[in-house]
Image (tube, grey):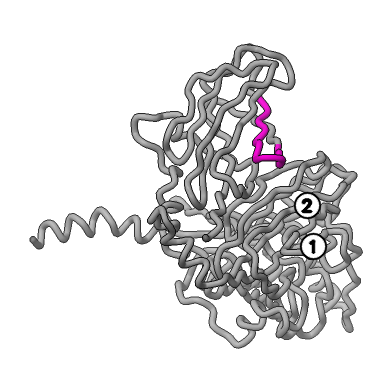
Amino acid sequence: MKKRLYLLLIIFLPVLAYTQDIFYGKWQLQTDVSSAGSINIHLQIGESEKGILYPARLNFNYKNFSGSYDLLLTKRNSRQLSISKNKYPINESPFSLNNNTLLLNGTLDFSKDLKGNPQLTLSRISGKKIGIALNKISTSTTDEKKTAEEILSLLESAEMVFKNVQREAWSDSNALKILKPRLSPVYFGLTDTIFVHSKEASIIFDNNKDNDIITVQNNGNNIIDQVDSKKSREAEDFNLDTGLNIITFFTDDFGKNPPSTASIGLQLEKSTRQLSFKDNDNFGGSVMAIKVYYQYNKEDFEKFESGPTGIDVQKLYNSIAFRAPAQDSGLKRNGKLVGSITSHTQQLTFAIWDDAVEDGDTVSLNINGKWITRGFPVLKKPQYITVILQPGPNLISFIADNLGSIVPNTSVIEIIDGKKRKSFFIETDLYQNNLVNIYYDVKPD
C-alpha cells in the first residue's frame, strides 16, 4: 500500500506543482545594470483575484534615491503578466520620478534559468510608442541630477530579470485597494463592478484607423485572440460565468501609428460600456479590465441544470473535448478561438464555402469530441450541414485535412439559427485548428 502511495505522489506531485500559481511572491532584480552604484529593485506580487488580477509593489533603491510604487499586473496567458500603465508612488525621496515610470510599461514574462529557478523578464513597450510626454525630474543638486539621469537610463533600456527569492504572497492593506477600484488611490486600468441578471453579452467592434492587434478574454478564456482591430468584424457573442467575471482587453501590438487607439463596446443587457485606449486614462497603456457580476434567477437555473435531460451542465462543459481522443490526432493540434454565439434552438445549419479560389481544401468538423463530418470538400458554392447541439456549451472544431493547392486551408462558415446568421472566416493548417463556442440556452418550462 505504501509503495502505491509513493508511486502516486511521484506521478501527481509535478502536476500539482505546475497547477500552483507561479507569479506571487517576492522577485529580486538579478541583472547587473550599473557599475556606477549599487541598485536594489524588488517586486512583491500578492495573491490574485481569480488567477487574473495581481496586486503588486515595486521597490526601487539606487544610490541615495528610494521609491515604492503600487501597480496592477494582469495575466495575459499562463506565462505572461501585463503591467498597468500607472504606478502609484507610496513614497519617493529625495525627488520624484513623476510619470517616468511609464518606461516600465509592457509585460513580465515567466521562464526558468538553466538551474530551473523561476524568473520574470521585463519586456518593455518602447518609450517612443507610449505617446505620452515624460515629465522632467526636478532635482536640487548636481548629484541628484546625475542620479536622476542614470535612473532614467535604467528605466528606459536596462535589461531587467527578476529571480524569485520568496514564495510568500505580498500582503498589505494597499493590495486590497488595488483590486477595489472604488478604494484605489489611482486608476490602474480596472473598472469595478457591474451587476447584471442576463448571462448574454457581446463585444462590439468600433472602427479603428490603425491596425492594432487586440485580444479580449473573460476569466482568462479568449473571446477573440490577436485580431486586427482595423478589419471590420461582426459582434462576438459570449456568455458570462455565474458570479464574478473579469473581462480583460489587451492591445498586443501598437500598430503602425503607436500608441494603440483600439476600442470596443461591451454590451450587457440593454446597455453598452465603452472600453477604449483613446481615453486619456488608458492612452499609452496595454491592458484594461472590467468586473461584471452575473446574478441568475436561482430557481430557473436549478431547473435548467437538472432539466428534463438530466444533464449536469458543468460536467458537460468540463468534458468538452479540449483534450482529444488518442486516436484522433487532428484534435491534438493547437486551437484558436475565432468566435462565440448563443443559440436558443437545438438544431443549427452550417453553410460552408470557399470565398476565394476553390483549390481542393477539405476539412473535418467535430462537436464536443464527436465527428460531424470528415474529409468534407470546400467548394465555391455553399454546402449545408445540420448540427444538433447539447444543452449548455458546445465546442465546434474545424480541422484541416490538407492544405489544398494554396496554403493555408481557408473557408467561410455561416451559422444559421432561424433568422439569425453569423459568419466566421476559417483559416487552418496542419498545426492549428479553429474553434467556435456555441452555447445552447435551453429555456426552462
Q: Nearer the viewer, residue 3 or 122?
A: 3
Q: Nearer the viewer, residue 121 or 376?
A: 376
Numbered range of the magenta stretch: 411-422
- In the rendered image, the quadrant that contains the N terminus is bottom left
Residue 257 location (% of width, % of height):
88, 46
x 51%, y 53%: residue: 111
Q: Are marks 1 and 2 in contact (CB under 8 Å)?
A: yes
Disc 1 is placed on an element classified as strand
Q: Please state which amino acid type lies under the numbered disc 1.
A: Thr
Rendered position, 359 above or below 38:
above
416 falls in the magenta region: yes
Tag 2 residue: 204
Query: In the current view of this chain or complex, which residue is farthest to the left?
Result: 1
Q: Residues within 10 Å of mark 1 (few under 14, many from 20)?
A: some
Residue 76 placement, left or right of 87 = left
Q: Residues within 10 Å of mark 2 (few under 14, many from 20)?
A: some
Per the picture, the main secondary structure of the magenta-coloured stretch is: strand
x 56%, y 57%: residue: 443
Disc 2 is placed on an element classified as strand
99 falls in the magenta region: no
